[in-house]
Image (spheres, helix red, strand yellow):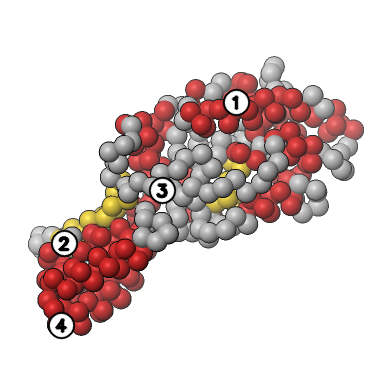
Amino acid sequence: MLHIDRPVKESAREAFQLCTSTKVSKRQKDLLSGFGEPIAQAADAFDSACQASVLHTLDRTQFAPNPPDEAGTDALIDLYDRRLRSKEYPGRPLYDRIRNAPGKCPLCGVGRIKQVDHHLPKAHYPFLAVAPDNLIPICADCNFLKHDRFPTTGGEQSLHPYYDDIEDHLWLRAKLLVSSAPESDAWRVMYYVDQHPSWSDDLAGRVRFHFEVFELGTLYETQCADELVTVGTAMDEVFLAGGEVDVQAELTSWMHIRSKPRQNNWMAALYRALAENPWYCNGGFRAVAAG
């Protein structure tokens, strides 16, 4: 859910030319010779659809050889598998610049970037197999969860880190849920999407879809387990000195610190939720820290 700058400057046409610049057999050259212009056109259509958030309206037949050509499609997919990702071909530096984008995985904000994936899967949109705008840095977990999914409705569009920027809006929230039921957990932290007032319903639906597809609620809840032990221990001393009011003020201060430079991260949301919970600030932190 992080916005990042496009890691490379090459166009889809340039990436295609780079991948086919050396070690191309006559058969491959014959198969690929007519695809330069369709690839450029497909990349332009993809760019326009991303800017308008209408990827679901794209006609997939325009992103593959037409009439259907299995050999040509396989050759296009092979451009990525062997000629961009493989270390033996000149496209590898472009792949590395995308994979080595700084920071955490832009789809979850937690995982370490280890791979490059297609926003629209190459199996269904082979003309976008090496289009840089369709290639995003990603962690292994998000890549697994993404599969070969592509949107068929407006609400099935996950966020694209090059095009979608919602970081100026506070939308990630957490809530500390406390239960007195004997056969349930005494407490748990629940993360959720809180629609920003400036968002359209379409954008809110896309954010929620992204949140669910990549299982961010579960991911963030898992991340905060150790943090709750640490903060609970620290708040004990604060509580003894100034009670509930001081604990709330301390947690609010930590929330502001964790909000820099990105306000929508799981730690900032956690501290905001804890500061807003009277039970927690009035000694509940001890029970939470104890598990």
- Circle 4 is placed at which residue position? 241
Dot in front, 4 or 2: 4
Who's the residue at 51% across and 31% down the image?
A: 51
What kind of residue is marked 3?
Answer: Glu
Q: Residue 126 appears in which quarter of the rendering?
A: top right
Which amino acid, mark 2?
A: Asn
CA–CA distance in space, label 4 to label 1: 62 Å
> Dot 4: within a 10 Å radius of its alpha carbon, few (fewer than 14), some, or many (20 or more) residues?
few
Nearer-N-terminus badge (3/1): 1
Label 2: how many Cα within 10 Å (few below 14, some 14–19, many 20+): some
Q: Amino acid at mark 4?
A: Ala
Q: Which label number is shown at residue 280? A: none
Q: Which residue is mark 1?
A: 45
Do callouts 2 and 1 mark residues in contact (Cβ within 8 Å)?
Answer: no
Q: Is residue 183 visible?
A: no
Q: Is residue 64 left or right of residue 273?
A: right
Q: Position of residue 252 (x, y in %)?
A: 25, 65
